[in-house]
Image (spheres, grey):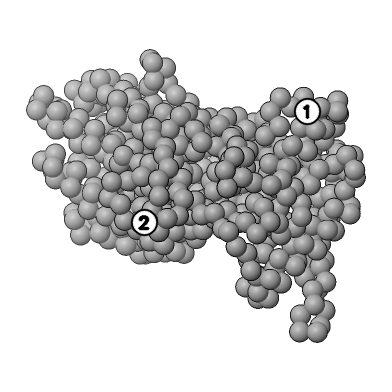
């Protein structure tokens, strides 16, 4: 029985909507307390410690004023010393955590554990360098061992840093019990200890997370080993073979290491990529991946301040009826302008971290405001489509929020169209269908974007009550067009029209592309052939003269 547990509660405000605390805030707070500040960035606005009525010690990040968590916390246990376990709890703020979010939360908890281990608190919470369950070095001991190699004059350029997670280990513990699970971990660690060389380093972060510093000459061998390990476990007087495989993050060190913490943080980035993005067994921490993560970090760090300062500018890409050469609509696009410079790619970082909703609602408000202004100026506006990410659908009040923004602007709803991308995920499909119906009931038009990309389902046409079908640019972006392309395109257009939908095709840039889509029966065009995305002032000029006749 383990005793003397030290429990740290992360009062984490898990909000995906606009508010004083969000996932980006948590990243910032974590950057201030974690040892690996170069991953998470700037100092936090508030960090403190206090005691709950239960007397448990707490590390509090952005304690929220509303106080009561939305659901039970996630908990992550790390054996940090003999008979001592650090348990980190992460509470949800406004909704329960989804199963897919656990791995991300585990990464945050691990980073906080790194911090606590690195600081080696001087009171009763002090950590030893050994992990209790396996006898391997914990994070602090592992970093010390790496530092010792450097002090001996050994170049880490000859090594690869590994961070690996045992697949489905929780199932082993649930099936055989925690005591047998610990026995499996002990045997696993003993096996790895026997296969590495004296000047290689092995560590155990706790749970099913391990680290290793392995010579490059032994890299492939070590990958094969941790990809398939067999452990003999005695259960009810019988021996059972337990197969253990891993998801692996690897950083191939190519220059001298100034910060020993990199041997954990960089392969951990690769592991997260392998597990949560690529869904593969192995990923490498390339310079491009690390740069991308750092860019995402910078995006998240500056995002909410940029929203508050209204640094996001709405551009309008015209939609043109190619028969009359007349402006008939537009799509609202967003650009981030910071210090008179356009910020590069930022939407993927926001989507990956569930931060798109605030921006999408921001764009909708600005579009409504612009259209009302144009009407007061005497212009004849056109309907504008506003994009919403599928990640936004996690907010069950999304349709209500969209409706409220439009109604508060006093704008006729016929001028706004909500644009979404179709999905092939069955669960998402059902949520998307319900959301579109909610908008339909509120008399708000919807459009499905990129239809025909990936694996489109005809169920989209049958089930969704949409106003506009936007056909993906992939039908026209080739150098030539086959008879198969034409047949498929004609059939899609015919079915959509029979179902009462408007049809638009995007990405038209050349005369032959325009001829091809017109011949297939689609006449409303979006693409550089007629116009590029325009800043608001230039689009106002387009409203004064809607003709594209040459």
- Identified at 79% across, 41% down, the residue is 213
In the rendered image, the quadrant that contains the C terminus is: top left
Label 1: few (<14), some (14–19) or many (≥20) C-alpha neighbours in 10 Å? few
- Identified at 14% across, 32% down, the residue is 372
390 with respect to 33 (left or right) = left
Q: Nearer the viewer, mark 2 or mark 1?
A: 2
- Identified at 35% across, 28% down, the residue is 305
Q: Position of residue 209 (x, y in %)?
A: 67, 53
Residue that protrudes farthest toward the top in the picture: 340
46 with respect to 159 (left or right) = left
| Quarter of the image where one finds residue 351 | top left
Circle nearer the N terminus (2, 1): 2
Q: Position of residue 326 (x, y in %)?
A: 26, 31
Asked if disc 2 and disc 1 are in contact, CB closer than 8 Å, the reply is no
In the rendered image, the quadrant that contains the N terminus is: bottom right
Q: Is residue 460 visible?
A: no
The answer for how far apart the CA atoms under marks 2 and 1 are is 51 Å
Report helix, strand or loop for mark 2: loop
**Relative to 213, does residue 305 appear above or below in the rendering?**
above
Q: Position of residue 229 (x, y in %)?
A: 81, 62
| Quarter of the image where one finds residue 327 | top left
Q: Is residue 82 visible?
A: yes
Label 2: few (<14), some (14–19) or many (≥20) C-alpha neighbours in 10 Å? few
Residue that protrudes farthest toward the front in the picture: 123
Residue 254 — which label? 1
Q: Which residue is mark 2?
A: 53
173 with respect to 485 (left or right) = right
**Relative to 369, does residue 14 appear above or below in the rendering?**
below
Residue 129 — which label? none
Report helix, strand or loop for mark 1: loop
Query: Is 36 or 273 nearer to us in this picture?
Result: 36
């Amino acid at each position: 029985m383990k005793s003397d547990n030290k429990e740290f509660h992360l009062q984490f405000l898990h909000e995906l909507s606009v508010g004083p605390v969000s996932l980006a805030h948590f990243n910032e707070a974590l950057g201030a307390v974690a040892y690996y500040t170069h991953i998470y960035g700037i100092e936090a606005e508030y960090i403190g410690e206090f005691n709950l009525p239960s007397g448990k010690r707490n590390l509090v990040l952005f304690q929220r004023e509303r106080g009561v968590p939305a659901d039970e916390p996630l908990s992550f246990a790390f054996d940090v010393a003999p008979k001592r376990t650090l348990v980190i709890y992460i509470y949800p703020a406004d909704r329960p955590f989804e199963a897919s979010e656990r791995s991300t939360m585990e990464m945050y908890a691990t980073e906080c554990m790194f911090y606590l281990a690195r600081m080696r608190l001087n009171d009763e919470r002090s950590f030893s360098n050994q992990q209790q369950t396996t006898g391997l070095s914990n994070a602090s001991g592992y970093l010390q061992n790496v530092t010792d190699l450097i002090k001996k004059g050994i170049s880490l350029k000859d090594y690869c840093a590994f961070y690996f997670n045992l697949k489905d280990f929780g199932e082993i513990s649930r099936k055989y019990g925690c005591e047998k699970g610990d026995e499996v971990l002990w045997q696993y660690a003993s096996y790895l200890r026997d296969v590495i060389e004296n000047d290689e380093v092995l560590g155990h972060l706790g749970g099913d997370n391990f680290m290793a510093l392995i010579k490059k000459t032994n890299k492939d061998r070590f990958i094969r080993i941790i990809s398939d390990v067999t452990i003999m476990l005695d259960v009810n007087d019988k021996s059972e073979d337990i197969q253990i495989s891993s998801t692996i993050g690897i950083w191939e060190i190519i220059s001298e290491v100034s910060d020993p913490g990199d041997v954990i943080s960089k392969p951990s980035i690769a592991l997260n990529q392998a597990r949560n993005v690529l869904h593969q067994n192995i990923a490498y921490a390339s310079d491009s991946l690390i740069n991308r993560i750092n860019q995402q970090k910078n995006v998240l760090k500056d995002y909410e301040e940029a929203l508050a300062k209204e640094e996001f500018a709405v551009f309008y890409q015209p939609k043109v009826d190619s028969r009359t050469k007349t402006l008939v609509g537009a799509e609202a696009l967003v650009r981030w302008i910071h210090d008179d410079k356009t910020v590069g790619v930022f939407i993927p970082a926001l989507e990956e971290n569930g931060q798109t909703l605030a921006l999408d609602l921001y764009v909708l408000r600005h579009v409504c405001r612009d259209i009302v202004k144009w009407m007061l100026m005497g212009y004849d506006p056109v309907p504008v489509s506003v994009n919403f990410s599928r990640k936004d659908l996690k907010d069950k009040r999304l349709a209500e929020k969209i409706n409220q923004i439009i109604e508060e602007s006093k704008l006729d709803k016929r001028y706004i169209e909500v644009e979404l991308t179709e999905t092939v995920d069955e669960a998402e499909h059902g949520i998307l269908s319900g959301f579109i119906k909610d908008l339909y009931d509120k008399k708000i038009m919807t459009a499905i974007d990129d239809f025909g990309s990936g694996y489109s389902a005809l169920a989209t046409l049958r089930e969704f009550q949409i106003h506009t079908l936007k056909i993906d640019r992939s039908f026209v972006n080739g150098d030539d067009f086959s008879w198969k392309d034409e047949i498929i395109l004609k059939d899609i257009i015919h079915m959509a029209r029979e179902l009462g939908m408007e049809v638009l095709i995007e990405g038209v840039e050349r005369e032959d592309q325009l001829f091809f889509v017109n011949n297939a029966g689609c006449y409303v065009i979006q693409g550089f052939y007629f116009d590029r995305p325009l800043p608001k002032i230039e689009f106002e000029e387009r409203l004064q003269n809607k003709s594209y006749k040459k």
